[in-house]
Image (cartoon, coloured by chain):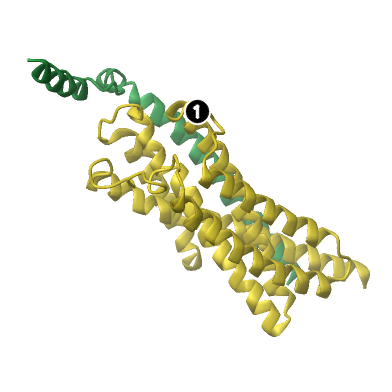
Chain colours: A green, B yellow
């Protein structure tokens, strides 16, 4: 009986590992995705504009 | 435009990794919960750092063989970005470890090995700044680079596996194996490594071009 209870509680515990299901159910995970995408696209735009500036300087020097 | 294809590729891959990494299903593991998604961000930073350090050492060897300053610039800027990635990896690891291991700086061999490795490369930059003469600076720092790499690799790959460690894959822990990093995760993890490494290469290439312009302008100024 004790063994059965241990095994059963282990199985139940595995199903109850807390994840961000609530966030995902409500669709809020997309808010997180959106924030991170805004940051990422902002940084990439900065990199691209930097790249272009450097290209222009290299052309001027040539 | 054609020669920038790899930059666009890195951006596309990283967009895929960022969205997919947050939205797709991951194994439900106790203690880790959702933080297992850090595997897409923290781990590729370190792999990218290794790739950049390899490239840095290759250019150091090239400099020693033909004495062109260009190789020295490549070598030092690649090491520069690699250490930048290392610092980011360190910070992200500390944040992750705080919640997964209970402390941001536990006594873990891999962590200590990376601390030592970062110090070794910090000394590389101090060494560089202590020289006025360009050729001597380049030659000594190239030699140091090779030794730094040769010391760092066993420290971070071999030593942690020989002792008790907290990191997965080291010291008696199973690696992120088939039960907790299933195929769906691998489909995002492997592109993530490529994407972050390419981003590091892009940043290094920008720094190299700026350095080249600085040198050109200095020569023009002096003449």
Q: Which percent across, then down, holds residue B57?
A: 61, 69
Which residue sits at x=71%, y=72%? B143
Rendered view: B108 above or below A51: above
Residue, far right: B223
Q: Which percent across, then down, holds residue B69?
A: 74, 75
Residue, far bottom: B66
Q: Which percent across, then down, holds residue B105?
A: 57, 33
Q: Which residue is mark 1?
A: B98
Q: Which percent across, then down, holds residue B42?
A: 47, 42
Quarter-wise, where is residue A8 in the image?
A: top left
Quarter-wise, where is residue B79 in the image?
A: bottom right
Left-right relation of A41 to B126: left
Rendered view: B175 above or below B52: above
> Observer-nearest residue: A8 or B79?
A8
Left-right relation of B26 to B35: left
Secondary structure category for the residue under label 1 = helix
Which residue sits at x=56%, y=67%? B55
Which residue sits at x=37%, y=46%? B172
Quarter the C terminus of chain B occupies: bottom right
Quarter-wise, where is residue B16 in the image?
A: top left
> Observer-nearest residue: B82 or B15?
B82
- Chain letter of disc 1 in the image: B
Left-right relation of B51 to A53: left
> Observer-nearest residue: B175 or B214?
B175
């Amino acid at each position: 009986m004790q063994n059965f209870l241990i095994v059963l509680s282990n199985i139940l515990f595995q199903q109850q590992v807390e994840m961000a299901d609530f966030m995902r159910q409500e669709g809020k995970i997309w808010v997180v995705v959106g924030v991170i995408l805004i940051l990422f696209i902002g940084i990439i735009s900065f990199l691209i504009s930097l790249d272009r500036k450097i290209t222009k300087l290299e052309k001027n020097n040539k | 435009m054609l020669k920038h294809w790899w930059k666009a590729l890195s951006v596309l891959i990283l967009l895929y990794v960022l969205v997919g990494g947050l939205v797709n299903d991951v194994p439900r593991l106790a203690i880790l919960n959702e933080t297992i998604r850090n595997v897409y961000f923290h781990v590729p930073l370190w792999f990218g750092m290794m790739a950049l350090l390899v490239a840095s050492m290759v250019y150091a060897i090239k400099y020693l063989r033909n004495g062109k300053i260009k190789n020295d610039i490549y070598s030092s800027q690649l090491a520069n970005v690699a250490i930048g990635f290392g610092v980011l990896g360190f910070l992200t690891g500390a944040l992750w470890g705080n919640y997964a291991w209970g402390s941001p700086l536990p006594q873990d061999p891999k962590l200590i090995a990376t601390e030592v490795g970062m110090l070794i490369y910090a000394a590389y930059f101090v060494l560089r700044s202590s020289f006025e003469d360009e050729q001597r600076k380049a030659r000594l720092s190239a030699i140091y680079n090779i030794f730094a790499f040769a010391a760092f690799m066993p420290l971070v790959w071999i030593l942690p596996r020989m002792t008790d460690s907290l990191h997965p894959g080291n010291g008696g822990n199973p690696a992120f194996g088939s039960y907790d990093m299933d195929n769906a995760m691998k489909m995002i993890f492997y592109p993530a490594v490529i994407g972050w490494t390419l981003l590091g290469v892009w940043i290094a290439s920008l720094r190299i071009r700026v350095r080249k312009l600085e040198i050109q302008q200095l020569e023009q100024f002096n003449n």
